[in-house]
Image (tube, coloured by chain):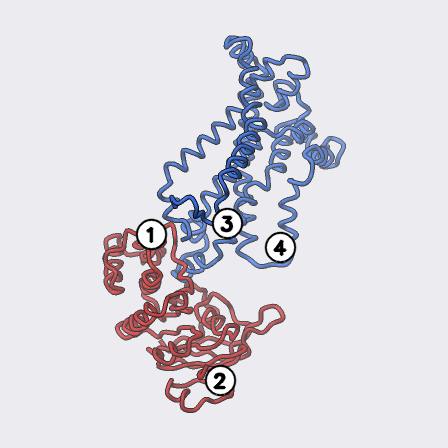
Amino acid sequence: MHIEIDEISKQFGTTAALHPVSLAIPSGALVALLGPSGSGKTTLLRILGGLEYPTSGRVLFDGQDATGLTVQERRAGFVFQSYALFRHMTVFDNIGYGLNARPRATRPQKAEIARRVTKLLDLIQLPDIGARYPSQLSGGQRQRVALARALAIEPRMLLLDEPFGALDAKVRKELRQGLRDIHDTTGLTTVFVTHDQDEAMELADLVVVMSMGRIEQIGKPGDIRARPATAFVRDFISA
Amino acid sequence: MSDATFRPATEETPLTRRILIGLAVAGLGVLVFAPLIAVFVEALRDGVIVVVESLGSRDAWSAIKLTLTIAAISVPLNAIFGVSAAWFITKFDFRGKAFLITLIDLPFSVSPVVAGLCIVLTFGANSAIGAWLVDNGYPIVFAMPGIILATMFVTFPFVARELIPVMIEQGRAEEEAALTLGAGGWRVFRTVTLPNIRWALLYGVLLCNARAMGEFGAVAVVSGKIRGETATIPTTIEMLYQEYLSVAAFTLAAVLALLALVTLVLKTLLELRHADQLAATHRP
């Protein structure tokens, strides 16, 4: 799905989290929102997912105005920073949650839900952990379960907030490839937030560098490296 | 850590440990166990037959029924109010939040007697609302509604106070995740929020229940302590005691203590039964 952000701004009280920003995300792209904390990248992601409403501006999905759509109507697969797995449910129930939450008319049969959950567990290469609780998983496993849970709703796009933030360096590397693979197999338009320029450069097709609620530069990783548009970008990517 | 010379930094010396344990046991013994045992000993002083007789009296029976009814009405209502208040305070940002929290705590700082008087002033026959209600056959003061109001006022903070810290600690992420997965507000509450707070809710309800059954001050003012009608267990105990009917007073006191003990046992049983679940769902 093609996403267009048209002059979106966000005000929290008297502080501006986002100055009007515009951005076009081509269908099927893997995009990184890169910036230090407080740059507005997470706010932008949450606006895309419908968890925050913009103060002004529009969001368009495939050319249709989606600004007024509720979080449920957006059908965005959202992976939270600390994964936000339901701690009182098994992995199996976590992944099946979105399918069980559908209105009766479109809710799949129990057996069908079980089949899809099993398939997703295979996709994240953790076929045997369905009966466990989130507290019994490692950080990397939790992240993959969160990804599977987001994919279960057959989302129109995938939004990830610092998906590798809480992991150690080795697991981080492995899971980067995992996300790339899942993106390539599903073909979903994917936006992830990160403060790690290596991660953004290595993984994304398109990198959006943000600072202080503004977009500093949009470009392919190579272009940003070769031709930083502003002094901030130069400093940030060389850090 | 069997080597005696190496002690973890957080561990006290054996002497300190003994002193601390001794203090705790002595405190519990003097303040909790001794009085509790005294109540039962006093009640049984003249034998079981006297106990059964005094429990069988019309007034005692009416007091027990009234107290249980009051608890059965005010505790569920306060559980609903407490959950709503805690939900509202922890999941939304709004102006005046600190003020609302203070307001919830108010019953802790106001003397129950004052609370009772406020209810009498507001709903008594001398006030406009009270007079209208009495004329229309719904007396509040010196009747069940007044006792319920007084009990609910005094026990209001228990559930909310128990829930707010837990809900703040858990944050909003799980609810947000459920929303992005397509769940509506009520479903999120039922399948995510409520299961996460159920233990805190249970504690809050148990505390609320114990206090609701035991409340004296506010109820004494509001109820008028009419024997066989508006006298609850605590107010009846006081009246019996004032009349030197100490066996009857202590028998009823023992009943109240037993009700509290039943609550505690229930809580412990639930904890034992769900111990594995508690361990599994606790934040690592």
The subunit letter for the residue under badge 4 reads B
Q: Looking at the rendering, which quadrant does residue B135 occupy? A: top right
Q: Which percent across, then down, holds residue B282? A: 41, 49
Label 1: which secondary element: loop
Q: Which percent across, then down, holds residue A33? A: 43, 76
**Residue A195 horizontal side relative to residue B229, left or right:** left
The answer to which of marks 2 and 1 sits earlier in the sequence is 1
Distance from disc 4 to disc 1, alpha carbons, whole Å, reads 35 Å
Q: Looking at the rendering, which quadrant does residue B268 occupy? A: top left
Residue matched to label 2:
A235
Q: Can you say whether A47 is above or below B131 in the image?
A: below
What residue type is disc 3 on? Val
Callouts 2 and 3 close, C-beta under 8 Å: no
The subunit letter for the residue under badge 2 reads A
> Which image quadrant: the N terminus of chain A?
bottom left
The answer to which of marks 4 and 3 sits earlier in the sequence is 4
Residue matched to label 4:
B97
Q: Which percent across, then down, holds residue B81? A: 55, 44
The subunit letter for the residue under badge 3 reads B
Depth check: B258 or B103 in front? B258
Residue matched to label 1:
A133
What residue type is disc 1 on? Tyr
**Residue B261 horizontal side relative to residue B128, left or right:** left
Residue closest to the far bottom: A227
